[in-house]
Amino acid sequence: HWERRVMGPEIMTGSMSSNSVVSRMSLALLEDSGWYRVHNESSVLAAGGGAFLWGRSQGPAFLSQPCSARQGSYHCTDPQARGCTPQRDAKGYCSSDWLSDGCMSMTGFSNGWCIE
């Protein structure tokens, strides 16, 4: 599994949410392992939520910096906080789980679009 701290809502982080996506990295892993053959990458990505936007435009330090150095909805500290998910695909709440290495970020509700 991928680290959620690094890969966010990617389906291979070990759990799913309403905004989980299948990234090209997961498709490449499955194909490179020899377990699967990806026939039509674009249809798989569309079925899994489309483009993988976690960490987009954050630069290479996003992968190694502590969570507290992250900007916007990639980092939050108040469990009562509400706002948009980093991908701006859902309204969310500030949370963390055991897969996130203690990093808190906005996690999407299953019933709302983010229009801020």
Image (cartoon, rainbow, N blue to C red):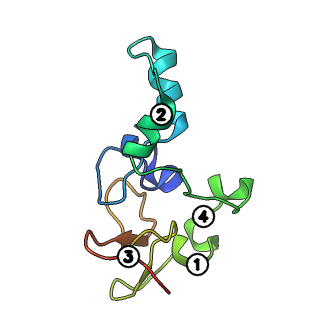
User: Between tags 3 and 4, which lies in front?
Assistant: 3
Label 1 is placed on what type of residue? Gly
Relative to residue 116, is residue 91 depicted above or below? above
Dot 3 or dot 4, earlier in sequence = 4
What x and y, as percent, mark residue 41?
50, 31
Name the residue: 44% across, 36% down.
43
Residue 29 marker: none
Name the mark on residue 72: 1
Residues under labels 1 and 2: Cα distance?
26 Å
- Dot placed on the residue nearer the N-terminal end, 4 or 2: 2
Give the quarter of the image for residue 94: bottom left
Secondary structure under badge 4? loop
CA–CA distance between discs 3 and 1?
18 Å
Select label 4 or label 1 by which is in front.
Answer: 1
Residue occupied by mark 4:
66
Disc 2 designates what residue?
Answer: 26
Q: In which quadrant of the rendered image does the N terminus lie?
A: top left
Q: Residue 113 carries which label?
A: 3
Tell me if mark 4 has few (under 14), some (14-19) or many (20+) residues whose alpha carbon lies within 10 angstroms of its own. Answer: few
Q: Which of marks 4 and 1 is nearer the N terminus?
A: 4
Q: In this view, does 114 lie to the left or right of 6?
A: left
- Please identify, in this view, whether the residue under mark 2 or under mark 3 is nearer the observer: 3
State which mark lies toward you, 4 or 2.
2
At x 54%, y 35%, the residue is: 25
Which numbered disc flags the more N-terminal residue, 3 or 1?
A: 1
Total tally of numbered discs in the picture: 4
User: At 36% across and 77% down in the image, what residue appears?
Assistant: 92
Identify the residue at image location x=46%, y=83%.
115
Give how far apart the Cα atoms at labels 4 and 2 are.
Answer: 24 Å
* Mark 1 or mark 2, earlier in chain: 2
